[in-house]
DNA sequence: TTCATGCTTCGATGATAGCCGAAGCATTGC
DNA sequence: GCAATGCTTCGGCTATCATCGAAGCATGAA
């Protein structure tokens, strides 16, 4: 009858603004101390402590004791993924109050979402592809056009043969956390990201657990040349 | 400072048990009337109405008027995806109060998650693969072993060449909604699902929007022979 | 030991929001 | 027209829970 697989319980954990702010602050993969998180959420340490024990009980964060500090981090990438998803949905309401604060501009600009590029640049890339008719998007599905194939082969040495064989969607739309739009996932999204790395245009940040992607100077230029947007 | 991209707002919407039950009831893709949803959540129509307008404002559900009924459905697959993710996280807490109720046993047994198999059978398949060392899993990453490759080629005519070229993870772990474990996603997960369809072992339910996967009788048998679990 | 820092527990307060009864619109059917 | 069904709005009740002050434990430093 009523039941409820306690999806509500987890959602309620994220549903409190203070806790949501803490979780958001942890989205970059680094661990923060309880007091840092308190400050991040704009609450007192007592309140934060209460929130953190709830988050811990809900297995959303993991503590690690170190000296007299208590570091908290997101339990794993699944949690981060769900948070990204929620943020994506939130962005569509127009209710988007603000980005995640000016906290981590690097994270907002470019980061790894599983194995493909997300963030400002990720969205910009898909925008550019769409605008120039290199891909056609309808809802979740994205399809590469003939021009798109040529574009990829010429500029990134990516041949569609490599991608489409398994009949898995070459492209998929993935809701972006910090932006309002989709970015490009799927085998193509992954392949492009990998090509960026091979070309030394971009690399994942060295800090362990960080999801930030750093572009080199030439990488920035090349990216702008290919997907450069005079958008907005 | 505080900010908050109102991830909290969306999460709070899902965070109420009554609303969560409604959303869960909608997870099979069908649209339900307001009163059906009220009953589903165990609340009066007035209360349900209030909840539904909030969900609508949060763009989680879409209404459709028909006669004097008002049908509600999930806005799109992104919403369903986030709900699945939340359910997956909830399942790990041990706090799992119950499955989604005996509501839709078919949906719990086998369904489509994007393009691969999820549900009881999906989890069972990955379990079986793991137990027999056909894949090795560490955290999110899953890797096919040599035996696994032979197994796929022999039994499902799936060659790894078709999957691994683009250097995208052939396998990926995806948290299952109704079960406590991961099921198999990635290009392999998609390819297997497609093969099931080609072999007429299983097919998506005819009802538009439904995510249920129906197995044929021979399909059941073959599946059991390949991945049959005396597990649990 | 003594003090300071970081975090937690306790208790009380206050506001948010879920809930239902009753009444009000709308649509369909007679 | 009238009645019935489906849904919504309104008002008030209640419970839950976030919040903070104050006090209590730890850990680390002097």
Image (tube, coloured by chain):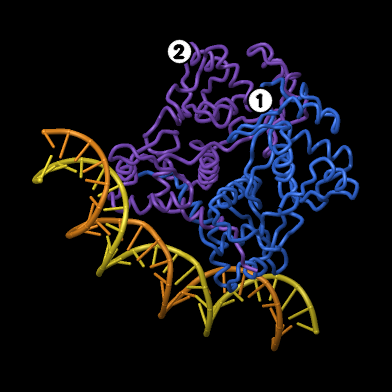
Chain colours: A blue, B purple, C orange, D yellow
Query: At 73% from the left edge and 19% from the top edge, which residue is drawn?
Result: B162
Q: Residue furthest right?
A: A218
According to the image, label 1 marks what residue?
A168
- Above or below, A39 relative to C4: above
Query: Which quadrant holds residue B24?
Result: top left
Query: Which quadrant holds residue A127?
Result: top right
Where residue A13 sits: x, y (%)?
51, 56
Where residue A1 sits: x, y (%)?
32, 41
Label 1 element class: loop
According to the image, label 2 marks what residue?
B217
Q: Nearer the viewer, residue A109 or B17?
A: A109
Query: At 51% from the left edge and 43% from the top edge, which residue is drawn?
Result: B83
Label 2 element class: helix
Chain bearing mark 1: A
Chain bearing mark 2: B
Q: Nearer the viewer, residue A71 or A2?
A: A2
Q: Residues within 10 Å of mark 1 (few under 14, many from 20)?
A: many
Where residue B15 sits: x, y (%)?
46, 53
């Amino acid at each position: 009858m009523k039941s409820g697989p306690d999806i509500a319980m987890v959602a309620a954990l994220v549903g409190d603004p203070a806790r949501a702010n803490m979780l958001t602050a942890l989205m970059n993969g680094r661990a923060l101390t309880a007091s840092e998180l308190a400050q991040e959420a704009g609450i007192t340490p007592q309140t934060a402590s209460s929130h953190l024990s709830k988050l811990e009980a809900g297995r959303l964060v993991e503590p690690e004791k170190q000296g007299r500090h208590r570091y908290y981090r997101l339990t794993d990438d699944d949690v981060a993924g769900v948070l990204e998803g929620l943020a994506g949905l939130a962005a569509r309401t127009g209710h988007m109050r603000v980005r995640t604060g000016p906290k981590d501009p690097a994270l907002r600009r470019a980061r790894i979402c599983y194995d493909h590029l997300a963030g400002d640049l990720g969205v910009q890339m898909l925008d550019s592809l769409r605008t120039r008719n290199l891909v056609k998007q309808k809802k979740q599905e994205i399809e590469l056009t003939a021009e798109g194939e040529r574009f990829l082969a010429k500029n990134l040495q990516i041949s569609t043969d490599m991608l489409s064989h398994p009949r898995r969607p070459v492209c998929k739309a993935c809701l972006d956390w910090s932006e309002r739009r989709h970015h490009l996932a799927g085998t193509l999204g992954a392949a492009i990201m990998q090509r960026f790395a091979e070309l030394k245009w971009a690399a994942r940040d060295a800090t362990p657990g960080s999801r930030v992607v750093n572009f080199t100077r030439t990488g920035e230029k090349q990216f702008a040349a290919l997907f450069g947007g005079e958008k907005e």
